[in-house]
Image: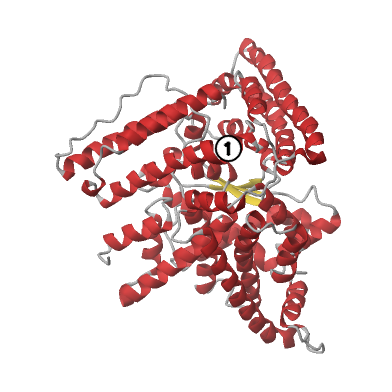
Amino acid sequence: MKTQLIAGLLSLAIIPGCGQSPSEPTKPAEAPSTTVKAADQNALFENFKKRFLEELWANNPTYGVYVGYYKHDHEMEVPNAESAKKSIAFENKILQQLNVFDINKLSPSNAVDWELIKNQIESSQWYREVFKSREWNPSSYNVAGIFGLILSTDYKPLDERLSAISSRLDKIPAYYRAAIDNLTTPTLEHTDLAIQQNKGALGIFETSIPASIEKSTLTAEQKKAFQPKLQAAVTAINGYITWLEQKRATLADGGAKDFRIGDELYEQKFKHDIVSDFTGKQLYQKALESKAQLHTEMIRITNQLWPTYFPNTEKPSEPLVAVKKMIDHLSAKHVSRDEFVNEVKRQMPIIEQYILDNDLIEMDASRPLVVRETPEYQRGVAGASVNAPGPYDATANTYYNVTPLDNYNDEQAESYLREYNHWILQILNIHEAMPGHYTQLMHANKSASLIKSIFGNGAMIEGWAVYSEKMMLESGYGNNEPEMWLMYSKWNLRVVANTILDYEIQVKGLSKEDGLDLLMNQAFQERTEAEGKWRRATLSQVQLTSYFNGFAEIYAFREELKQKMGDKFNLKEFHNKFLSYGNAPVPVIKRLMLTDLGLN
């Protein structure tokens, strides 16, 4: 899963309802004449993009920090009516300025940037005016992430970062007052998540910031000045938690909003978030077909392995029962719970060396990957994730967050470890780190177009990570062991089941009982994993489809290019070229690549 903090921002581009006026007036982009030459339109559009981004960061300083733009790091948005009004004015102005340009006179790359800016602004408007998650999702209000990022990123001296933190601390009480004012119809599920994550947020203000203040070179008076601010922040967060807990009592009695969004909103959200050649329903149908194909392949591998592992046992007559028995038997091979995080750290250099030895994709040792335990304020949604720097600070650390099993009892821990067994843990590391999220986002930060890197498409990002899994195994990783291919098929079945689960929950009203049956008996997942996925599917919508959608489009495009290019096709060149277009949607990348390669 690509992160969590950044991914959420990337998917919306302009944070709905969180705008803030620039500290200095920003001049509007120059409006080109309708008769100017294409070259002049492109020059003016380049100027427009620079001005647009400057004003975007002034209006959304927190988003700016997440992409490595630190000019406004001391400013913090309060999600109230005033900031929403400023966001609306900003978005309307940008749409007006975009309409001055003749897209037919722009270069292919600039035409795509024009589309991306327009789509992202329209998406922001849809989230605010139609989806309105600010009214029902309490977990969207949590200040910890940005403070943690400022503390952990050495983009300037600690004392200066603490000064930015000091300014931001002043806004926390107003931030949570606005959150409470906004939340008119919360869901029970998002309320529970908000309580959990905001409790985790307290550690930033009670422990992490005070520890950084102590080791700073600030004067005693400056250090002392932090105390009332930190106390006010802790009080505000605790007040929000208390309000949520009291609200939860009334929600549990039947006053909660249904977390399911229904068919109409689902298709609209799918269109804005995924940017696909499929509709949500079409992708769902494709996922059903893929599930049947994967079952066929898993049955074939199980028949191959059966004599090795069960030489004296009759194979069950029901093929999927035999598959499940084989998976259950193999899943007993896993690391101990106490060594889970350390095992991830051990595997990463081995996987990296394999990629280099097989010349699969360009790597860059100057862009560090740091494996760490998931911060408390990020736990509760996924067991593994990546926080990557933005293109303005591209050489900062990428963090691979791995959640330890501290909060699991022995039964839950064993179930989790069986899910992430000897083979699947390797596939997880490929997905999250190399050549998955970490590698893709490292390439994206080198894209010549800031727009394509910043306005990331979740389906492309997640789809690449899923594609990288199959690509690695196709190249020979795992020595073509049938056990590895069986576990990969199970893992890939997760991607397919994600799409089925998400659509059937949000659109068809799937019950928890039937959802767990899909995950455990048809996708062969352990109960702990299935319970966690059910919870995740109740807390998000559409995002779970991004994996399968992006994978299907990337893999199909690669195979199409192989046929068109014949002997001239080179896998490494394909990977490097594909990733050079930043985080743009796959259909956009396909269009640009075919044009650049002269294959349209």
The answer to whether 16 is drawn above or below residue 330 in the figure is: above
| Image coordinates for residue 467, horizontal then vertical, percent | 51, 64
Of residues 412 and 107, which is closer to you in this image?
107
In depth, the one of 221 and 250 nearer the eye is: 250
Look at the numbered disc 1 and give the secondary structure of its residue: loop
Q: Which residue is mark 1?
A: 132
Estimate the x, y position of residue 82 in percent, counting from the top left: 52, 22
* Outermost residue to the right: 410
- Residue situated furthest top in the rendering: 221
Residue occupying the point 65% across, 70% down = 490
Number of on-image labels: 1
Could you classify mark 1 by the number of other residues whose Cα lies within 10 Å: few (under 14), some (14-19), or many (20 or more)?
A: some
Q: Quadrant of the C terminus?
A: bottom left
Residue 395 in sight from this viewpoint: no
In the displayed structure, does residue 53 sit left or right of residue 131? left
**Residue drawn where x is 62% and y is 80% of the image:** 296
Dividing the picture into quadrants, the one containing residue 42 is: top left
Residue 104 in the image: above or below residue 347: above
Give, as a three-letter code, the residue at label 1: Lys
Query: Which residue is nearer to you in this view: 517 or 511?
Result: 511
* Residue 60 appears left or right of 111: right
Q: Residue at x 40, y 58 (%)?
A: 587
Colouring mode (rainbow / by chain / secondary structure / one colour): secondary structure
Q: Is residue 285 visible?
A: yes
Residue 276, given in percent of the width and then of the height, sits at 45, 57
